[in-house]
Amino acid sequence: MVDNNDSFIREVNEELRSDQFRSAWKRYGYAVIAVAVLIVVGTAGHRLWNHFDTTRASDAGDRFLAALTLADQGRMDEAAQALAALETDGYGSYAVLARLRGASIAAEQGNPDAAVQDFNAIGSDTAVPEAVRNVAKMRAAWLLIDHGTYEQVSAAVEAMATPTNAMRHSAREALGLAAYKAEDMVRAREWFEQIVEDAEAPRNVSDRAQMLLDNITASGKAD
């Protein structure tokens, strides 16, 4: 009798669970299906986007390399045109890389003023990563050593000549050279001394600074 009761109870429980499941499915079935569809569509969309993203990046990379090849072959006008197109519709980081290389080509073609203008534009573009902006400012400063004034070099990179800035060594060297070229030996000495006294300064930069310090001392112009 006990076995019959247990069997009956199990059947009742199973029937109740079945009824509860059917009731729940009637109430929430469409929502479950909708969630499942969203998951499937979301996964497919994510994969499609990844494929699209990879394809665009690969295409931009190929175009950038092709422009570099043109420049290496001395076909500067064609390279400049290819890079200008990438600046407009290049994908990801290739647009700003194209801007940097385009500015370099302007300098190589003997147009330092245009190159400085392009580098300065990159350096002041807050949409560009800070590290890239700093590189552009340094490139402008090195051109301005020969084609500008100390004040222009200072405006470009003096903010980077602080003790904690990773690019301080290059910034100080540019400032020192600009001052040296302007025959402002007192200021040049100050910048070169900062390089020599910085234990983290690269050996080649420190050696050049020391050589120029020796020249300044020998000239007696900073006394």
Image (cartoon, rainbow, N blue to C red):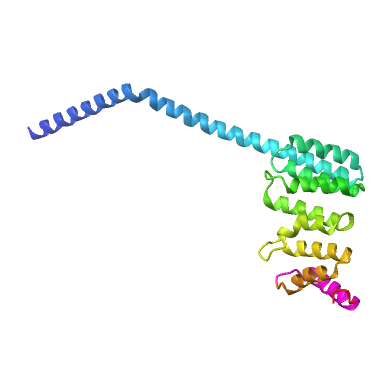
* Quadrant where the N terminus is found in the figure: top left
Is-magenta flag for residue 136? no
Q: Main secondary structure of the magenta part?
A: helix
Most distant residue in the top direction: 26
Tell which residue pokes out farthest to the front in this image: 223
The image position of residue 192, as x and y in percent, is 79, 70
Q: Which residues are magenta?
A: 200-219
Q: Work out which residue is located at the far left of the displayed protein and give it.
A: 1
Residue 93 in the image: state x and y as whole percent: 70, 43
| Front residue of 36 and 85 | 85
Q: Which residue is drawn at the image coordinates 74% and 49% (left, top)?
A: 123
Residue depicted at x 77% and y 55%:
155
Q: Residue at x 21, y 27 (%)?
A: 16
Which of the 4 image quarters holds residue 97?
Answer: top right
Residue 216 falls within the magenta-colored stretch:
yes
Placement of the C terminus among the 4 image quadrants = bottom right
Above or below for 157 versus 9: below
Query: Compared to 29, does 194 lie above or below?
Result: below
> How many callouts does the rendering have?
0
Toward the viewer: 207 or 150? Answer: 150
